[in-house]
Image (spheres, helix red, strand yellow):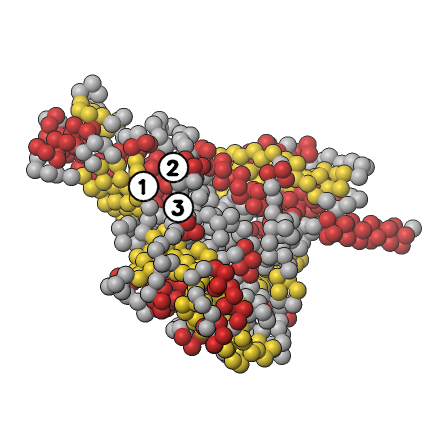
Amino acid sequence: MEQNFAVVGQKVHKYDGHKKVTGEVEYSTDIVLPGMLQAKILRSPHPHARILNIDTSAASRLPGVKAILTGKDVPQVGFGAERDFSPQWGDQRILKTDKVRYVGDEVAAVAATDEETALEALSLIRVDYEELPGVFDPEAAMLPGAPQIHAGIKNNISIFFPLMFGDTANGMKGADYIIEDKFTTQMVNQCTMGPRCIVSQFDHSGNLKVWRDTQFPYPFRAELSHVLGIPASKINIVRTAVGGGFGSKIDMQPFDPISVLLAKETGRPVKLEYTREEEFIAGHPRHPFAFYLKTGVKKDGTLVGREVKCIVDNGAYNALGPLVPLVAMHAFVGLYRVPYVKYDAYVVYTNKSFGSAFRGFGNPQGTFAVESHMDMIAEKIGMDPLELRLKNANQPNTGTINGLKITSCGLTECLQKAADSGGWAEKRKQNSSQVKKRGIGMASLIHVAGGARVFGLPGAGLSDGTGAIVKVDDFGKVVVLSGATDIGEGADTIQAQIVAETLGVRYEDVVLHGPDTESTPFDLGCHASRTTFCAGNAVKLAALDAKRQILKLAAEHLGVPADQLDIRNRQVLVKEKPEKGLPLTEVLQKAHYDLQGKIVIGTAYYEPPNGITDPQTVTGNMSATYAFGTHVAEVEVDTETGQVQVVNFVAAHDVGKVLNPLGLEGQMQGGVAQGIGYSLTEEVVFDQGKIVNPHFLDYKILTALDMPTVKTINVETIDPEGPFGAKGVAEPGLVPTAAAIANAVYNAVGVRIKDLPITPEKVLQAIEEEAGHNKLFSRNFT
């Protein structure tokens, strides 16, 4: 039965919206401290070279220069993805001593009284290099004789996962058809409006305070401690407002310890801020992938198995690269019911900027391949692509061959509603002899929506949880101390709604204390669409703890057992006699003043019931629940220019329970916008390892004028584990977009683009090649 909620599910205003509109919100770039120095980093101009000598003498004599660091001045401690699992993966260093591996590698750093002096000092540092051959394509990097980027790493393969799931004995034996092809994706940048920035300061007792726009305050503190040898107990990370993250501000990066070491060296606070060019060069973008995909299917559309060779262009260092193909894998293994999958994943070093986390974390790449392939399969066997997906769609309360436990699942409903709303049946048949042709395509997704465990993260151990404290003062003000990080997506809004609903108070009564690692409980961080689910459950449990205390106090005054009481609209009421009760403030004040200073503080720690993925077999229930969805794109393709325009879009998502309709719509609209850019226009372009478009003039992100009409459909499945039934939805809005658009382009003009982005040049070339093929076929036939 549908519950009536006072705050949950309502269109409340964004928690910090007024501060952002008025400019009150404080970003790390806004931090100004007495005596603060400005820092800059000298970066390598070469993609691959030995460092022979670094001469800082001229720079050190420049007035205003307070400190210069090179590799010999800093700890040479490895850091990076999953260093606790595999020391080899922690391949990054603060400043490089022996050689550089990409254009942008950190070589030296300067702290000066102002930015201009710091930049001038960089120009005075002389570095002698011996240039080495570079390798810029991962498949070329794997060949014998390719330049070796890291010592001891054979064929530049950082990690190889040879994985098999399900009915490996029979494999593809039952297939009537085997369809195979290759799909490739490009490197794209997160394009956050706020560039990375860190401010570091030591006090006289050696305690370190860091202001940082990080998505991961607690793991970030642990990594700083590990690399610099500073006890974590002496480090306080203050998470400032985050001007957009999309994963780019998850892992610790070399500029973080550089700022800290310069502050330690000078005894003064040091600010280090990226330029837009540095955001592109050293900003940890989305990894390019290549998929060699083979699918076996029966005549009736039943999937038999898949075999995948996945090659990840890792760039020069790991960061979170080794984990990305493991998330991409779920598109092949978990999106549909499939009895057998062989998945060989290679993470390969190249002399290019290295990737890390980006919204979807490998899933957009894998889904592009899988969902393009599903349309190709449907055509091969003569089945409607919608029918093929419905036949193989996951169902509630089932499992996958790699150990995912699917609880709530609205995939079938998403498919049907998106198709109906998008006009699937009638628009599939539309055709025109005109220059501009229209087509429609669809694609679906699965994504983690209740936390995500893959071996555990550096500095976090095996916890995927969140702690929360809810304090209710004498006047009904509710203060929430949560370590969860809002990066602009509205996590604070959701937490305030959940607490208000649970305690029976107004949304406006709830105040969130911004996270810093000294005063708020542990939270793993903002990633994997986990915050609504994990932090939401934590604050709900803490609010319930506070509520129990309040009801116990009220029971003493009302002479009614606590279990017969409730709180609604700031009134403590008898459930059966709601006219009998007390104002919440009166109960709290009586407790404080009449009952010897009792205060109400609720606490909780929520650990999601997901499983640690086995590092050998990579099996296990990665998330406590999973999100599903379907996108339907309608496009118009100009056959004379190759230009693709998305004219209509439908995004249907299984959200569990809608907690904030406005926030949810914003997430879906933003995800689709990012997905359309990924599909059609965005690409980081290299020339011999150097990025040639590191700015918004030549890197083509969408504007509001480029967006089509986007209709969002919320499928509520009410997840049994989620707070009020909700799931995480932050990443899914992006995941299937590219495949839906690629399938629509094929429906429009009969050419399939298997290499992102879908540019006019690729479309025109494919149309011309197809026309030439048809002309040749016709001539040979006659």
Q: Earlier in the sequence, mark 3 or mark 2?
A: 2
What is the distance, in whole Å, between disc 3 and disc 1 at their CAs?
Answer: 15 Å
Q: Are marks 1 and 2 in contact (CB under 8 Å)?
A: yes
Residue 665 lies left or right of residue 219; in this view the side is right
Q: Which residue is mark 2?
A: 15
Q: Disc 2 residue type?
A: Tyr
Q: Which residue is mark 1?
A: 512
**Count of numbered tags:** 3
**Residue 290 can be seen in this image:** yes
Q: Earlier in the sequence, mark 1 or mark 2?
A: 2
Q: Nearer the viewer, residue 32 or 75?
A: 32
The percent coordinates of residue 610 (x first, y second) are 37, 52
Q: Badge 1, how many Cα within 10 Å: few under 14, some, many 20+? A: some
Q: Disc 3 residue type?
A: Glu
Residue at (49, 36) in percent of width and height = 665
The percent coordinates of residue 481 (x first, y second) are 28, 45
What is the distance, in whole Å, between disc 1 and disc 2 at their CAs?
Answer: 9 Å
Q: Secondary structure at mark 2?
A: loop
Q: Which residue is mark 3?
A: 26
Q: Disc 1 residue type?
A: Leu
Q: Secondary structure at mark 1?
A: strand
